[in-house]
Image: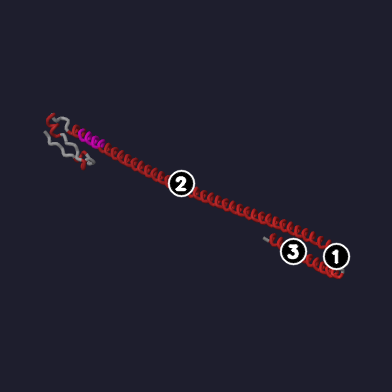
Amino acid sequence: LQYLASRRVEWYDRLDRKEEEEEEEEEEEEEEEEEEEEEEEEEEEEEEEEEEEEEEVEEEEEEEEEEEEEEEEEEEEEEEEEVEEEEEEEEEEEEEEEEEEEEEEEEEEEEEEEEEEEEVDEEEEEEVEEEEEEEEEEEEEEEEEEEEEEEEEEEEEEEEEEEEEEEEEEEEGMEGYARAAAPAWPAGARAACTPSPTPHHLKRHSPAAAPACPAG
């Protein structure tokens, strides 16, 4: 626009110059006419020739003016076309920049979505790992409880076996005591006086506390 404005100023300057030149020429012509009027009688032929020359000059000037106007119009049109082309190029550049910005925004959004998905996946993996660890801990606890129960059962079985062995030993001791105390008993009397198995609440008492079988 500044360029067009400067061109217009130049064009107006040219018109002003032309007008000044025309005014000067008119003044000169007026002076010549005055001189011609004074010398009309003597220079009629010259005046006719001058008039013809003036007409030719005017025609040439008109032609020159027309050519100049055409050239100026062409220049203005070219300048306008250049300005339009520049504006179109600027618009295209702006559109390209906007498209690039949109693409960058889309890429950033995609990256953010991918990061969010990765975070979600990591959280899910952590949750799964925690659940698996909890399950493993529960299984280990269950196994420990089962082992403790098995140990308790084994201890109970060992205690029962020890009690049975003690009972058997006490029974054997009582039978041996009875045999030693009455070696001359008949078979029937011995069977009648053979002590019964020691009750559980008396199994730790001494064999000497057992009642003696009456003689005969």
Image coordinates of residue 23 in percent, x first then y, are 78, 67
> Is label 1 in a helix, a strand or a loop?
helix
Magenta portion: prevailing SS class: helix
Residue 210 counted in the magenta span: no
Give the numbered dot on residue 166: none
Magenta part of the chain:
164-175
Which callout, 3 or 1, points to the residue nearer the camera? Answer: 1
Q: In the shown orientation, is residue 144 left or right of residue 63?
A: left
Taking 149 as reference, is 46 above or below it? below
For image coordinates 18% across by 34% down, the residue present is 178
Image coordinates of residue 159 in percent, x first then y, are 28, 39
Whichever of callouts 3 and 1 sits on the residue coming sooner in the sequence is 3
Q: Residues within 10 Å of mark 1 (few under 14, many from 20)?
A: few
Residue bearing the label numbered 2: 121
The residue under label 3 is which amino acid type? Leu
Marks 3 and 1, how far apart at CA: 34 Å
Direction top: furthest residue:
187
